[in-house]
Image (spheres, helix red, strand yellow):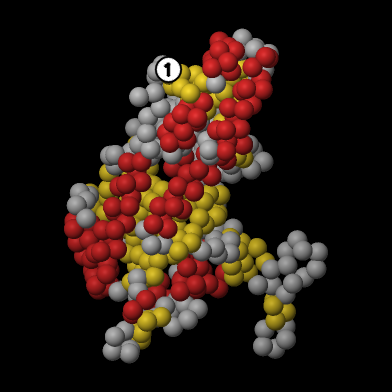
């Protein structure tokens, strides 16, 4: 592994670890979980502004729903299954029509798509309500082969920023275009102005008639072109229920990883009986558009760490500012600085160890904290804040101005020292 492999950075920066007893699982440490939470909150805000309503659906569902959706046939070998009542101490059993008991098969969800259809189906929808947009940070589990597991990039337990739009065929182009704009803006904010796009077409194992696939592939290709996307065609790599656009990023070894996706689906609404009432007062199937901006949160964090070589943008860093005392006499003023920054919403850590300042500077750089504030007797006397940025720029500001500059910079709204 190279020095900027996310697994190396995860250990160096004390973000996460993995171990044999949890194969393909992630143990998030406080600094790593803070990064995770900041990224999740950012995506949540973006999705809300794009018109998505956040929902929450179960992780464990009866196998029957996965059989109806077609996921069991496609993903059954990768789904974690158990029987209802296993491990509960007392059998919790279902009963058939003759009164005989049988344990109901349950599965951990590998994705959230059928769950979102269940929410949509809870009442009859009018065409006037469409498009209906749902989003969820869905906890998913897939029994990936042990040889394919790779740090955060391929795990057995992960969270996906699942989103689904239920719309009419006439709304496909607009909805795909809206999502492409959203994805471009998010990737630019996160430091990825460039990415590659692939159009994945019908696989050999698929649901739905060929004429349905013809319609779906043509509609998605047209929508992608209208959104200004250039894409390669990958024959046979689509989802079993529809074609998809894949958004790929390169890791530190130059390998391409799928992150964001847009999938067009005429099949699941049919299989799971999704309906709306059209303008002629007739029942009709909606089109379902599957969206993910990041894809796996875990994988995207790996890509972020490698792309930025651990030096995350200030607004995204788990610890944005390190405040360090020059000597013990400055401890009270340093605590005042920390409190003011915390009150301003800045993620700050205090280093008041009895160490030399040079040691504290080195340690903050080792943890790749973007901003360093040294607090000495002169700062306390003059009521100032001495700020040092990663690139070496330094500035001394009055207390209130320093706090405000850091607050604004921490929110991605401006520079600190200029």
Point 47% across, 44% down: residue: 39
Front one among 151 and 172: 172
Which residue shows up at 57% across the image and 38% down it?
343
Residue 121 in the image, given as x and y percentages of width and height: 47, 77
In the picture as drawn, the residue positioned furthest to the right comes out as 89
Residue 249 quadrant: top left
Number of numbered discs overlaid on the protein picture: 1
Counting from the top left corner in percent of width and height, residue 281 is at 32, 90
Q: In this view, does 175 lie to the left or right of 124?
A: left
In the figure, is residue 191 to the left or right of 220?
A: right
Does residue 201 sit above or below 385 in this rendering?
below
Nearer to us in this view, 216 or 168: 168
Mark 1, secondary structure of its residue: strand
Q: Mark 1 points at which residue?
A: 394
- Please tell me in which quadrant of the rendered image residue 390 appears: top left
Q: Position of residue 394 (x, y in %)?
A: 42, 17
| Badge 1 density bin: few <14, some 14–19, many ≥20, Cα 10 Å | some
Q: In this view, does 320 lie above or below 264?
A: above
The quarter of the rendered structure image containing the C terminus is: top left
Q: Which residue is drawn at 69% across and 78% down?
A: 94
Horizontally, residue 184 falls left or right of residue 410, namely: left
User: Residue extending furthest front?
Assistant: 382
Can the viewer see residue 6?
no
In-image side of 84 versus 120 (left or right):
right
Front residue (pair 53, 216): 53
Please name the residue shown 21% across and 65% down the image: 218
Residue 159 appearing in the image: yes
């Amino acid at each position: 592994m190279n020095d900027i492999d996310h697994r190396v950075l995860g250990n160096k920066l004390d973000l996460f670890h993995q171990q044999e007893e949890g194969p393909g699982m992630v143990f998030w440490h406080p600094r790593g979980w803070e990064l995770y939470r900041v990224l999740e909150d950012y995506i949540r805000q973006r999705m809300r502004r794009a018109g998505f309503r956040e929902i929450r659906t179960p992780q464990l569902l009866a196998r029957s729903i996965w059989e109806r959706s077609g996921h069991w046939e496609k993903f059954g070998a990768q789904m974690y299954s158990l029987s209802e009542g296993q491990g509960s101490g007392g059998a919790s059993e279902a009963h058939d029509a003759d009164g005989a008991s049988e344990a109901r098969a349950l599965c951990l969800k590998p994705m959230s798509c059928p769950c979102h259809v269940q929410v949509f189906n809870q009442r009859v929808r009018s065409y006037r309500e469409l498009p209906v947009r749902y989003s969820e940070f869905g906890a998913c589990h897939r029994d990936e082969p042990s040889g394919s597991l790779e740090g955060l990039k391929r795990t057995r337990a992960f969270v996906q920023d699942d989103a689904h739009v239920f719309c009419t065929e006439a709304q496909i182009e607009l909805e795909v275009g809206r999502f492409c704009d959203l994805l471009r803006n998010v990737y630019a904010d996160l430091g990825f102005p460039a990415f590659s796009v692939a159009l994945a077409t019908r696989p050999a194992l698929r649901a739905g008639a060929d004429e349905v696939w013809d319609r779906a592939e043509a509609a998605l290709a047209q929508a992608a072109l209208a959104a200004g996307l250039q894409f390669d065609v990958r024959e046979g790599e689509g989802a079993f229920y529809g074609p998809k656009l894949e958004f790929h990023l390169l890791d530190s070894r130059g390998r391409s990883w799928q992150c964001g996706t847009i999938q067009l689906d005429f099949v699941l609404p049919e299989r799971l009986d999704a309906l709306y009432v059209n303008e002629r007062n007739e029942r009709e199937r909606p089109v379902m558009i599957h969206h993910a901006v990041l894809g796996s949160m875990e994988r995207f964090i790996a890509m972020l760490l490698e792309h930025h070589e651990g030096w995350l943008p200030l607004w995204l860093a788990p610890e944005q500012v390190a405040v360090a005392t020059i000597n013990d006499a400055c401890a009270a003023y340093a605590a005042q600085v920390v409190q003011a920054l915390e009150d301003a919403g800045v993620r700050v850590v205090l280093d008041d160890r009895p160490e030399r300042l040079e040691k504290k500077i080195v340690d903050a750089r080792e943890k790749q904290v973007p901003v360093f504030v040294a607090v000495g007797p002169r700062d306390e006397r003059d009521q100032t804040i001495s700020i040092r940025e990663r690139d070496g720029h330094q500035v001394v500001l009055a207390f209130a101005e320093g706090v405000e500059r850091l607050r604004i910079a921490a929110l991605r709204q401006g520079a600190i020292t200029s």
